[in-house]
Image (tube, rainbow, N blue to C red):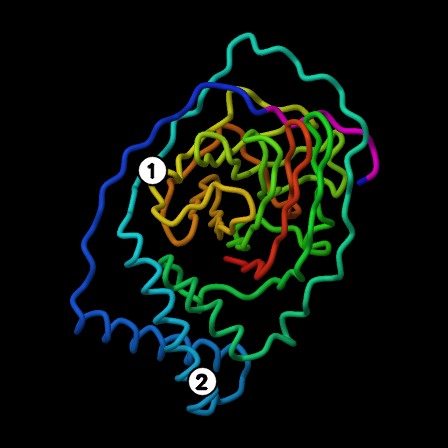
Amino acid sequence: MKSPVRALLFCGVLAWLTACTIGSDSAANREATVEALGRAVVQTATATTGEELSPEDGLATAEAAATEAVATIESHGTEVAATVTAAVANGAPSPPAPTSPIITTTSPPTNPLATPDAELAGIQAELAAYGIDPAGGTLGAIHPPVTLQAEGFQQFDASDGFATLSVENFVLAADMTWNTTYGDAGCGFILRSTSADPAGSSQYLVAAIRRDEGRVIFQTRLEGEPLLSDRFELMPNLLDPSFQWQNNQTNRMVIVARGNEFTIYTNGALLGTITPQSRLGPGLAAFVAVNDSGNTNCYFDNGWLWLLP
């Protein structure tokens, strides 16, 4: 990815969301949920690895991960069933052509077959917390930690992604720690890119930015150009009580992609489900830092890609 690209455009009308809250389960129900989730994860991990897990390395680890996942969801108490309406920007000027972006090469993703049982159990517990049956998919890759830096007007820095995996239905997750000069900048993912080179290729861009105490932007880009009628904004500052918009803070973002629907979570809170007008087929996934002016630094950790059927 070394050719010049068009700038990523952050403009348009806000698509406001509303939230509804749900109460936490009783202590007895919570304990039963954790135990059942933990045992389900152990069974799935056993089926995946073909090896029987010991009580110490299996059930205890899985139940601990399940406890953490259930506690995360309960702490937010937010569940939104929202399909966001696109914000259409009429007559928006074309952005100036930027200089070549910085492309960061990282270590290759971890071989899924080499993933420790405890780490796999933790991923499966997190999937279950989002209502996804771990038995219905496989681990695609675990991404090593990576720092991305973008500097200059409307520039971005993308990682080299999850090797050559071309994916359509998947779950993508990572912890993102940011430091930006201005609010119209942040960290996120590139999804279903038609090429490892973003210049002239098509992809979905999903980025959390710091403006207005936090926004998550979903933008379709076709052949290197943003499709202004296919742009969405979600509001984690209203829907996610744990969202941290300040510099040097960490948020976890998870995206579930099924067909032409993309469900987005931050810190375990459901922000909404987006259905873009344009449908892209299988493509590459990567991490990205997006910058409006000044500079942006994004650190990604605990990132993984789960393949769905």
From the viewer's perspective, is residue 84 above or below residue 128? above
Q: Which residues are magenta?
A: 2-9
Under circle 2, the secondary element is loop
Q: Nearer the viewer, residue 285 or 268?
A: 268
- The numbered disc on residue 89 is none
Give the left or right position of residue 274, taking residue 293 as reference.
left
Q: Nearer the viewer, residue 125 or 237?
A: 237
Q: How far apart are the alpha carbons under marks 2 and 1? A: 37 Å
What amino acid does circle 2 point to? Gly
Which residue corresponds to the image point at 44% horizontal and 76% vertical from the top-left? Answer: 44
Q: Position of residue 65 (x, y in %)?
A: 41, 72
Q: Position of residue 35 (x, y in %)?
A: 29, 78
From the viewer's perspective, is residue 125 above or below residue 221? below
Which residue corresponds to the image point at 48% horizontal and 78% vertical from the top-left? Answer: 45
Q: Which residue is mark 2?
A: 58
Which residue corresponds to the image point at 67% horizontal and 17% vertical from the top-left? Answer: 95
Question: In the figure, residue 108 lies in which quadrant?
Answer: bottom right
Which residue corresponds to the image point at 80% horizontal and 27% vertical from the top-left? Answer: 99
Q: Which residue is mark 1?
A: 238
Instruction: Looking at this view, name the residue that lies furthest to the top.
Output: 91
Q: Position of residue 258 (x, y in %)?
A: 47, 47
Q: Nearer the viewer, residue 280 or 61?
A: 61
Q: Earlier in the sequence, mark 2 or mark 1?
A: 2
Under circle 1, the secondary element is helix
From the viewer's perspective, is residue 81 above or below residue 94? below
Which image quarter is the N terminus in? top right
Q: Are marks 2 and 1 in contact (CB under 8 Å)?
A: no
